[in-house]
């Protein structure tokens, strides 16, 4: 945002290739171990810190002209209210926050040449940005409605909607991404969490969402888009049925491999990955889909083990929330791979959590525990029991050999 309050450029999609190679350039200024130790955030080229490092290196004139830096949810709040703030849960995902102080990691950004004068004050989820601006109220004939800072990171709102009454619970927020994690009262930043590349994101009430970002249904969505581009009119239901008909546990990919980050011909990349790693190469749509589904389930198993090992906690059930819970095959495979009961729902977890935070801010709901009780009473979850955990147990070693390849 420039000094006149106008956008300097249009937003750039987080999957844009401009951050290719930026992690290595940042690590030359801030060693990888130090960056994790200061921020506790999982490494991914799409993180905001690498986007800002790109601007500092290749478009310094943009930063020189800027007066404020706003993340997308805060930009919309600014358009509504005229107030420039940064909501905590979303800031926490940028790798620009010091989770121990709860404030921007100013010194890290300075080392990357990012002007810290751009950084707005941080506000908590459940506080108010302000009210609708006079101009908007006049144009719409609307009253001065408060604009509330929800947990603006979508997973932050989704986790509010986990219908658990237990203090220690574990969840998979499943959509384009699968975010597998638990809610803690403080971050865990140590050698073990670094080794598993686990992340400490902020939650409502300054809790910690201790989790792993896993490439989720993007793999299926982008594969379907490719088949449609090739003239194959195929629905998600068709793909699920074809996957069920394919032979199980023949080959695996690492869903988080760089091969699968960018849009494009995902089915071909799945085949190339399997060929490169010396596995059976899936030939049909059903075989490719089976490979994707089972690879996601195996990655869930890996992450389930990692979180239990690092936290020292055990979990009786896995709560799957979000749009991905409509995919019953994935829910069942998650139960089988993790050998743990899965409770699926709510589907609209992010929207539900968003509303709950607004109602807490307005005093209509007392606290997070009451919000979760209301949400649990409003939902009809689906339950998935492990049906074939032995087959996944036997195949897991093969999956581990292709991780990170």
Image (spheres, rainbow, N blue to C red):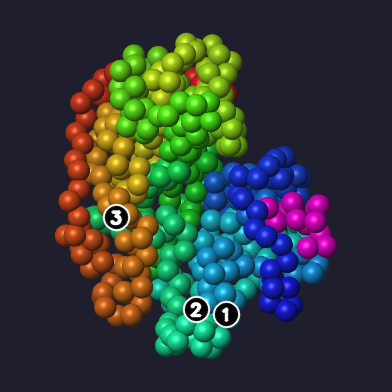
Looking at the rendered image, the disc whose residue lies closer to the viewer, 3 or 1, is 1
Give coordinates of residue 157: x percent, y percent.
Answer: 39, 60
**In front here: 12 or 98?**
12
**Res. 147 image quadrant:** bottom left
Q: How crowded is mark 2: few (under 14 residues within 10 Å), some or many (20 or more)?
A: many
Label 1, secondary structure: give it: loop
Label 2, secondary structure: give it: strand
**Disc 3: which residue:** 162
Give coordinates of residue 267: x percent, y percent.
Answer: 51, 24
Q: Residue at the spot x=29%, y=55% of the render?
A: 162
Q: Is residue 58 magenta?
A: yes
199 lies left or right of 47: left
344 lies left or right of 283: left
Q: Do the residues labelled 2 and 1 touch (CB within 8 Å)?
A: yes
Q: Do the residues labelled 2 and 3 touch (CB within 8 Å)?
A: no
**Res. 344 image quadrant:** top left
Is the stretch drawn in magenta largely helix, strand or loop? Answer: helix
The CA span between labels 2 and 3 is 25 Å
Give coordinates of residue 275: x percent, y percent.
Answer: 55, 14
The CA span between labels 2 and 1 is 6 Å
The CA span between labels 3 and 1 is 31 Å
* Dot label at residue 83: 1
Q: Residue at the spot x=47%, y=64% of the render?
A: 152
Q: Residue at the spot x=60%, y=49% of the render?
A: 14
**Disc 2: which residue:** 129
Q: Write the start and end of the magenta stretch as one range.
A: 51-62
């Amino acid at each position: 945002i420039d000094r006149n309050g106008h956008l300097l450029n249009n937003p750039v999609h987080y999957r844009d290739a401009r951050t290719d190679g930026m992690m290595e350039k940042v690590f030359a200024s801030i060693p990888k171990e130090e960056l994790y130790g200061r921020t506790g955030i999982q490494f991914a080229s799409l993180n905001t810190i690498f986007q800002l490092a790109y601007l500092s290196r290749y478009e310094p004139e943009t930063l020189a002209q800027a007066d404020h830096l706003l993340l997308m949810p805060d930009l919309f709040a600014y358009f509504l209210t005229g107030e420039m703030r940064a909501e905590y849960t979303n800031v926490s995902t940028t790798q620009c926050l010091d989770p121990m102080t709860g404030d921007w990691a100013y010194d890290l950004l300075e080392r990357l040449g990012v002007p810290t004068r751009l950084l707005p004050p941080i506000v908590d989820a459940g506080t108010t940005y302000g009210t609708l601006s006079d101009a908007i109220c006049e144009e719409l004939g609307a009253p001065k409605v408060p604009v509330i800072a929800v947990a603006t990171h979508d997973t932050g709102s989704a986790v509010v909607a986990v219908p658990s009454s237990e203090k220690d619970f574990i969840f998979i927020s499943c959509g384009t991404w699968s975010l597998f994690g638990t809610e803690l009262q403080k971050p865990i930043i140590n050698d073990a969490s670094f080794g598993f590349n686990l992340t400490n994101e902020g939650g409502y009430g300054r809790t910690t969402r201790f989790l792993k970002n896993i490439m989720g249904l993007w793999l299926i969505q982008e594969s379907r888009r490719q088949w449609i581009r090739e003239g194959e009119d195929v629905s998600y239901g068709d793909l699920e049925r074809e996957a069920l008909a394919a032979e199980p546990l023949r080959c695996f990919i690492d869903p988080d491999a760089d091969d699968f980050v960018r849009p494009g011909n995902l089915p071909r990349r799945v085949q190339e990955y399997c060929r490169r790693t010396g596995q059976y190469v899936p030939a049909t749509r059903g075989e490719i889909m089976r490979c994707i589904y089972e690879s996601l389930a195996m990655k869930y198993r890996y992450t389930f083990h990692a979180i239990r090992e690092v936290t020292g906690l055990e979990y009786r059930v896995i709560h799957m929330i979000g749009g991905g819970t409509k995919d019953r095959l994935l829910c069942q495979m998650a139960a089988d791979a993790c050998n743990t009961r899965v409770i699926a729902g709510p589907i609209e977890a992010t929207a539900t959590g968003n509303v709950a935070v607004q109602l807490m801010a307005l005093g209509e709901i007392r606290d997070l525990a009451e919000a979760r009780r209301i949400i649990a009473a409003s939902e009809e979850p689906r339950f998935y029991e492990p049906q074939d955990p032995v087959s996944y147990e036997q195949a897991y070693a093969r999956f581990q050999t292709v991780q990170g390849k």
